[in-house]
Structures are given as structure tokens and as C-alpha cells.
Amino acid sequence: MKTNFKTLALAVALLASVTGAFASDIANAISGKKLAPYNWVKYNRDGSVDTTTPPQVSPTNPFTECSGEEEICAIGTDLANPQADPVIVRYEELP
């Protein structure tokens, strides 16, 4: 049983890293609840709001280029709990 729990924990961690899901969302999904929607606002590398990309509502990061560790790429605000800390995703490093 202990090995199965460790395997499940590793599988959930891998799923989170691949899908861009967040711990609270994974816990909700496992318990059968729907994922919380986030309002995602895209930013340019210079820090200004990207006015060419409209805000998007999604339970996970909708921007594929926002999966790195560089400048802020997008900020997601939990629509169900706006007082919660926002989720910040960053640009990938330029080649």
C-alpha cells in the first residue's frame, strides 16, 4: 500500500508539471470536483500587458510559451476566490 501511495504521489506530481495544473486543482479533480477557472492575462517580456491577446478563462495555463523561469509571461487569478494568491507563470529562456 505504501508503494502504491508513493507511485500515486509521483504520478500526480508528473501530471501537474506536464499540464500546468496546480495543487488545489489536482486535489479537486481527485475528489471529483471541477477545476477552478482562472482568468489569465498575458504579458510581454518588457512587463507590459499584451493587448493583442485577450484575457482567457481556463483552469490551467493556456499559453504554451509560458512554461519557463524568465520574465513574467501571464498571471492567473482564481475566479472562484479572487483573494487567493495569483498564479504567475514565466517565459522560457530565449535561445
Image: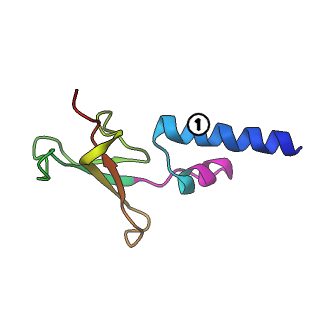
Closer to us: 55 or 75: 75
Q: Quadrant of the N terminus?
A: top right
Q: Residues within 10 Å of mark 1 (few under 14, many from 20)?
A: few
Which residues are drawn in magenta? Answer: 26-37
Give the residue displayed 68% in from the left and 53% down from the top.
Answer: 31
- Residue 92 lies in quadrant: top left
* Residue 26 coordinates in the image, percent (x, y): 59, 49
Q: Identify the colour scheme used.
A: rainbow
Q: Is residue 94 above or below residue 41?
A: above
Residue 15 position within the rendered picture, expressed as x and y whole percent measured from the top left = 57, 37
Q: Amino acid at mark 1?
A: Leu
Residue where numbered disc 1 is placed: 14
Q: Residue at x 37, y 69 (%)?
A: 82
**Where residue 75 appears, x then y in whole percent?**
29, 54
Furthest-front residue in view?
95
* Relative to 60, residue 39 above or below: below
Q: How many marks?
A: 1
Q: Quadrant of the C terminus?
A: top left
Identify the residue at image location x=67%, y=40%: 10
